[in-house]
Amino acid sequence: MGLLRLVVVGVSEKNREGKRSARERLREQREKDRVRAKRRRGLGVAGAVVAVLGVAAGVGMVASNTGGDSGKSGSRAVAPRGATGTVIPTGKASAQKTLTVYEDFRCPGCKQFEDVFRKTVHKLQDKGRMKVRYHLVTIIDGNMGGTGSLYAANAAACAQDAGKYVAYHDVLYKNQPSETKDSYANKSKLIKLAGKVPGLDTETFRRCVEEGKHDGWVRKSNGVFTRSGYSMTPTVLLDGKSIYGDQNKPLSPRKLKRMVTEKG
C-alpha cells in the first residue's frame, strides 16, 4: 500500500505539473497574442494616419523615421553646378517671388502637383515673375525601400551640371513609374529618358549617372529636409509660406498666378 500510495502521489504530482505547465503555456501564448494584436492595431492606426494625411494634403508620402538614404555619409557631397547649398535654383534671380518645392521623383503626389502646375510655373518663371528653389528628397526610398528616389535625384543633378535640369526634371515626372515599382533604381532607364532632352545624353552625363557623382549631395539634401520640420512631399512654399495641401484653402493654377502677380 505504501508503494501504491507513492505511485499515486507521484502520478498526481505529475498531473499537477502538467496542468501548471499547460496553464503557463496558455498564459504565455495569450500574452504573445496580446502583444501581436497590439502591434497590429498600432500599425493600423499609423497606416490610417498616413492615409488621412495623404488624402487631406494630396501628398505622396509622409516621411518615415529612416529618412531614406540620408543616414549614409560615406560618399562625398559633390554639389551640381549652380546649386546653392542643397538647393537647385531655377528662373531669374531678380524675380520678386520665390517658390520653394521639396520633391521626390518617386512620389505620386509630386507628380500630381507637377502635372497640374507645370505650365503655370514655367510661364511665371519665363516672365521673370517667380523663381523656383528645388530641394531633392528621398522619402519613398526610406518608406518603401529601394534606391530610385536617390538615383533619379542624382540624375537630375547631373542634368543640372549640363544646364538642363528643368527639362529633365519634367521628363522624370511625366514618365514616373508606379510608386511600388522602383524602376528609377535602373540607371539605364534614367539614361534612356535623357534622350528625351536634346543634348543631354552625353558621355559625361552617362558617367555622372552611373558613378552616382551627386549621391552624397542628394543624401545631404534629404538630411536637410528631415531636419526642416516638414514631413511630406510635395511641400510647396511661396515666399516661405506653405500654400499647397490644405483642403480648406485649395491651390489652383489661377490662384497661384494671382498670388504671384498681385501687388502688395
Image (tube, rainbow, N blue to C red):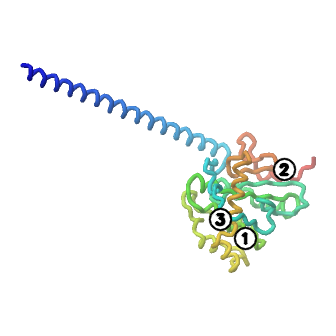
Query: Marks 3 and 2: in contact by CB < 8 Å?
Result: no
Considering only order in the chain, which callout, 3 or 2, is on the residue closer to the N terminus? 3
Contact between labelled residues 1 and 3, with CB atoms less than 8 Å apart: no
Packing grade of label 2 (10 A; few <14, some 14-19, many >=20) is some
Secondary structure beneath dot 1 equals: helix
The residue carrying pointer 1 sits among few (fewer than 14), some (14 to 19) or many (20 or more) residues within 10 Å by Cα, namely: many
Residue topped by disc 2: 239
State whether residue 61 is above or below residue 208.
above
**Residue situated furthest left in the rendering:** 1
Q: Of 131 and 225, which appears nearest the observer? A: 225
Q: Quarter of the image for the N terminus: give it.
A: top left
Which disc, if any, is residue 126?
none
Residue linked to disc 3: 152
| Foreground disc of the pair 2, 3 | 3
Q: Residue 53: horizontal and vertical position, in percent?
A: 64, 43
The tag on residue 159 is 1
- Give the Cα separation between the discs numbered 2 and 3: 27 Å
**How would you rate the neighbour count of disc 3 (Cα within 10 Å): few for under 14, some for 14-19, many for 20 or more?**
many
User: Quadrant of residue 184 in the image?
Assistant: bottom right
Q: Amino acid at mark 2?
A: Asp
Q: Is 225 drawn above or below residue 14 in the view shown?
A: below
| Residue in the foreground of this view, choosing between 208 and 152 | 208
The image quarter in which residue 49 lies? top right
| Of the pair 4 and 210, the residue shown nearer to us | 4
Query: Residue extending furthest bottom?
Result: 203
Q: Amino acid at mark 1?
A: Ala
Q: Position of residue 145 (x, y in %)?
A: 56, 56
Q: Secondary structure at mark 3?
A: helix
